[in-house]
Amino acid sequence: MSHKIRTYGDPVLKTPASPVSDVDGKIIRLVDDMFETLIDSGNGIALAAPQIGVQKQVVVWDLDEDPLAIINPEVVESDGEWVYDEGCLSIPGLYVEMLRPKQVLVRGLDLNGNLIEIEADELEARMFQHEIDHLNGVLMFDRLTRERRKEAITEYRRMQEEAAQADAQTTREPLLGRLGLS
């Protein structure tokens, strides 16, 4: 079942998620729901459970048409630096230049409850860091300097206002047409 993706301002996004103690049927259903939500988003590459309002340490991703999930992920090693324009399904439409480690080693559990380690670099490494931030109640705004955060939030709010005005206009036009007022 697809879920609504929570967006900036929703307090669930600022709350750290709980570790999963048992990879059971509920977690498997959650992963299935998360994949469906990710697919329905149309443009995301990964999703953390808090983004759909579930405070569990679960991440799903699909970078190469090979959808995967990890439970209780943590970055255990990192190296290098890489600057990239980062976006977020919970902050739709906004991309900000961010510096993060270029390579990471991530440890967690697979859907069978087995310990796994994943070596990732560039986009995949960034994706893990971004989603693990979500599990810790950290948004990409929190990784910016005070000045850049203020600029990014102002830009995001401006984009949201424009989208709301466009939605209102779209809703209004058919009504006016039906009333013969267009």
Image: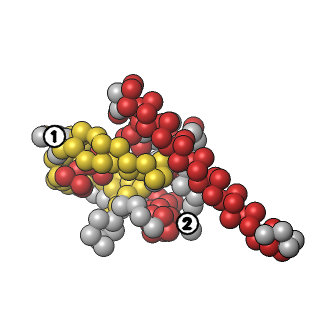
Q: Is residue 160 left or right of residue 146?
A: right
Type of the residue with mark 1: Glu
> What residue sits right under mark 2 in the picture?
2
Quadrant in the rendering for residue 179: bottom right
Residue 20, compared with residue 27, is above or below; it is above
Q: Position of residue 144 (x, y in %)?
A: 35, 32
- Name, please, the residue furthest toward the top: 146
- Quadrant location, the N terminus: bottom right
Q: Nearer the viewer, residue 132 or 26?
A: 132
- Quadrant location, the C terminus: bottom right
Identify which residue is drawn at 16% across, 47% down. Answer: 103
| Mark 1 closeness class: few <14, some 14–19, many ≥20 residues within 10 Å | few
Q: Is residue 182 left or right of residue 130?
A: right
Quadrant in the rendering for residue 74: top left
Q: Nearer the viewer, residue 85 or 115?
A: 85
Identify which residue is drawn at 43% across, 37% down. Answer: 152
**Which element carries disc 1, helix, strand or loop?**
loop
Identify which residue is drawn at 50% across, 68% down. Answer: 40
Type of the residue with mark 2: Ser
**Residue 150: in sight, yes or no?**
yes
Indicate how the structure is coloured in the image: secondary structure
Question: Which mark is nearer the camera, 2 or 1?
Answer: 1
Identify which residue is drawn at 23% across, 40% down. Answer: 100
**Residue 54: in sight, yes or no?**
no
> What residue sits right under mark 1 in the picture?
81
Q: Position of residue 107 (x, y in %)?
A: 24, 48
Q: Is residue 46 left or right of residue 98?
A: right
